[in-house]
Image (cartoon, rainbow, N blue to C red):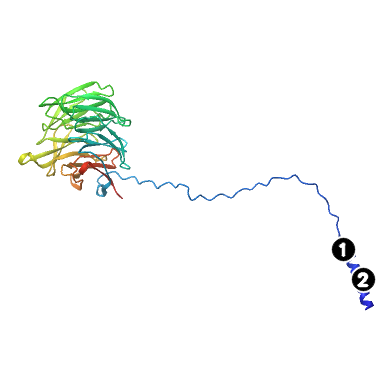
Amino acid sequence: MLKKFIFMVAALILMLACTLQGAVTPTVLPAATATPLVIIPSPAATPTDTPIPASPTPIPAQIGVDTVARLSISLVFGQGEALRSLAFSPDSTVLASAGGNTADFNIRLWDVASGNLLRTLQGHTSIVWALAFSPDGQMLASVSKDGTARIWDWRNGSVLETLNFPGEATSVTFSPDGQTLAVGGTDGWPNAAIWTFSVPAWQPQLKLAEFWNIPALVYSPDGGYLVGGGTSRNVHVWRTSDGNDLFTLAHAGQVSSLAMSADGATVASGLCQASGVNNICTQGAVWFWDMQTGKLMRKLSVSTDWVERVAYSVDGSLLIAGSRDGTLHFYTTSDFNQIFVATSPGGGGIFAVSPDGRLLASTAVNGLIDLWRVGP
């Protein structure tokens, strides 16, 4: 037992010695200057309520030979007792409509993207027969059975000028350069006339004489010629520089509308070329005339009712004819074959093609407007 005790004491002494030999006196370092802790956050995730732009609305194709089969009504809007005229603004974003019968002679401006009413122009006291935007889009001209033409700043609704005539004013158009306004109408039965005015002074320039009434007017693309007439069955080609009557285009019936090709070589006239009992139209037609010679080029029988409106597609590949039964007929200008027919019931054949060629607006029943565009 004694030996065991002595051995344990010796082991403890040996362990203590090793511990003391390996001990190191700690070094005291000077205190460091404290540096603020900067926390760099990780990129935040996109909040779930961040607005995401809607996909852009596809721009419809131009109406032409290759696309007309996909033409369909995309929007219906409108208001009015009876619509007698439609006109697109030069940028194709606004449509003006007007008409009336015994009441509601207001002009309405519509946003074509939504069909929403933008503004109503009030002032005419009888039927508004025709509308025309100035080429720069700043003015809208309207003509009425009340014997006036009104020129509007349509954006704020103010009347810039009122022109007075001896009888009803039935047609209106601006020259391509926007420097002249032409108005057609009656000039004391049985006389009719076209009056031209400088813009914006509104001073009279020319008075071109005709008979009965002037429902149709169109300028040549270069503004060198003014073509007009209608009720007398005659359409005249006047030189705008001096009012010289170059050609008389004689028709088999009253002419309601004129359209000029983009190159100015051809003018198309919409008419009733045959009537039956009680002077009811039995054959509507479009006649094509050579602007260089004044010669009739072709007769195109369209429907069993009066052709109320004619227009070329913007690309020139189609001639569009609207008849009073509400039917729209589309013909190729290369061979005059009818390749498409559409209907706006109750529309009466009144329509307009947008300047960008992508939209067609036609009147429908109960003062409504059908807006057509090429679908996918």
Q: Residue at x 28, y 23 (%)?
A: 200
Say how many tags the image has. 2
Q: Residue at x 90, y 68 (%)?
A: 14
Determine the secondary structure under disc 2: helix
* Residue 266 pos. (x, y %): 19, 35
Residue 28 lies left or right of residue 308; in this view the side is right
Determine the secondary structure under disc 1: helix
Residue 370: which quarter of the image?
top left
In the image, residue 129 sits, relative to residue 363, either above or below, namely above
Q: CA distance from mark 2 to mark 1?
A: 15 Å
Pick whichever, 187 or 147, lies toward us: 147
The residue pinned by badge 1 equals 19
* Residue 75 pos. (x, y %): 28, 45
Q: Residues within 10 Å of mark 1 (few under 14, many from 20)?
A: few
Residue 314 shows which numbered tag? none
* Residue 347 pos. (x, y %): 19, 43
The residue pinned by badge 2 equals 10
Pick whichever, 258 or 168, lies toward us: 168
* Residue 4 pos. (x, y %): 92, 77
Callout 1 amino acid: Thr
Which residue extends farthest bottom?
1
